[in-house]
Amino acid sequence: MRGGRVGGVRRAGTVLAVTLLTAGLNATGGVTPAFAAGSGPVFNVPGPNSSQAEKEAIRTQFLNVIQNAVPGSTLKMAMYHLWDPTVAQAMADAHDRGVNVQVIMDSTETSSEGDGTSYPLLAAALGTDTSAASFATLCGTNHACNSTVKPSINHNKFLIYDVNNGASSTVIQSSSNLTPSNYSKFWNDAMVVQDDQGVYQAYTTYFAKLKAKNAADWAYLTPTPHSPYTYYFFPRPKDDPRPGDTIVNVLDNVGCTYTEGGTTKHSTVRVGMYKITRQAVADKLKALKNAGCNVDIVYTEMDSADSTGSAGTWEALHYSGGPAVRCVNFDDDNDENNPDISKPTQRQIIHSKFLLIEGKYGDDTGRKVMWTGSHNYSGPALTNNDEALLKVDDPAIYASYVARYNAVRGAASPGTADNNPACKGVTEAPDA
């Protein structure tokens, strides 16, 4: 099988032991889904030619954690869209067997966007009192839990499993909402982190902030390392006293050319991203390419003169000698009765939000590091929305993501023929 869990990372003092959980790696960077000890990525494989198990690999990982939660433990989920009654029922069943189950969702769950089933099921089973051990709750109407800006959303997609206050823990940080289209149509990834106190404590603290819904008490959480992980939690309000854009600050650490073993080498930057509409990020990627970096981008949507009336990210990244750019935004069922414009859920897209850097990063050469999470390269993702971003500094995990990147790159459609309304942001893309 192509979808599922790959290499894992375990901490043992300062030593990282990397374990391949099952055999069968192939070009998609995935293997048979499994819930096993250790940490590592999980990838789904969308499209009409994929098996149900491949499409639902990330969903399976969530369900395995939920269904195996033991009495007295705690499950905490922050999820933008949960349109899956089976997952919702699994959470309710966990509560019935003595698990503390806490769910925070976006207010759109009770609007026409929701499936009309999952949140009502959770609210009835868990109650809505956030002072209780179990609850289901929504952020404010038309705004995120940690923001009063309208519109803004709780765009998070993570699950925390906790036994004995972190004595044993699992954190799943995903790009995937728990919805049918995310399984079958969208290229997604998830990073599973087990028994890491730094990650567990950081996500637990952030979840408490979401639960409090006190925007006046919210401050962008400064990135904190806990090797091999670093975590970033948003929004980063426009009046935040620390300068810059989080992603631009990351890219500022890249040295495009360096000498190693007497040979001049060039760093590589790969971006697998649903939405790139933040001009500062596009301009930085262009600058890195012009400075000698290899810059390779697979995306679903940018903005452009066609969509905004003035040159945007699409123009910044499309020029002679510029980055390699490929779009994934197409109708994969070829059904003329369900065209992209009127039925956006028919589209196949890349819904992941990951960044891969290889080469010179900071003062070190030979680095292989990646970032993933819910954070698109859009304005609202930086300053308005509840979002989480996780950095993993590990060569084996990096290699898994490169394999995944290459699989999406190879499947990209319309690919380089992306001078079209969908890729340029004129046609509305499916919800992120």
Image (spheres, helix red, strand yellow):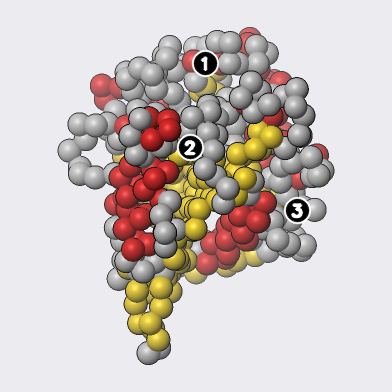
**Amino acid at dot 2:** Lys
Q: Residue at x 73, y 62 (%)?
A: 26
Kind of residue at badge 1: Thr
Which residue appears at 61% of the width and 25% of the height? Answer: 341
Residue nearest the observer in this picture, 239 or 301: 301
**Residue at the far left in the pictured view:** 241
In the image, residue 55 above or below residue 18: above
Residue marked by disc 3 = 2
> Which residue is identified by label 1?
108
Q: Residues within 10 Å of mark 3 (few under 14, many from 20)?
A: many
Image vertical order of residue 156 relative to residue 44, above or below? above
Mark 3 falls on what kind of element?
loop
Using the image as rendered, state which of residue 74 and residue 174 is in the foreground.
174
Q: How much space separates mark 1 and mark 3, taking CA atoms?
A: 33 Å
Circle 3: residue type: Arg
Q: Which mark is residue 337?
A: none
- Asked whether the residues under the numbered discs 2 and 3 touch, taking CB atoms below 8 Å apart as contact, a structural biologist would say no
Name the spot of residue 122 as percent of width and height, x first: 63, 16
**Number of marks:** 3
Asked which secondary structure carries label 1, the reply is helix
Q: Is residue 143 left or right of residue 324?
A: left
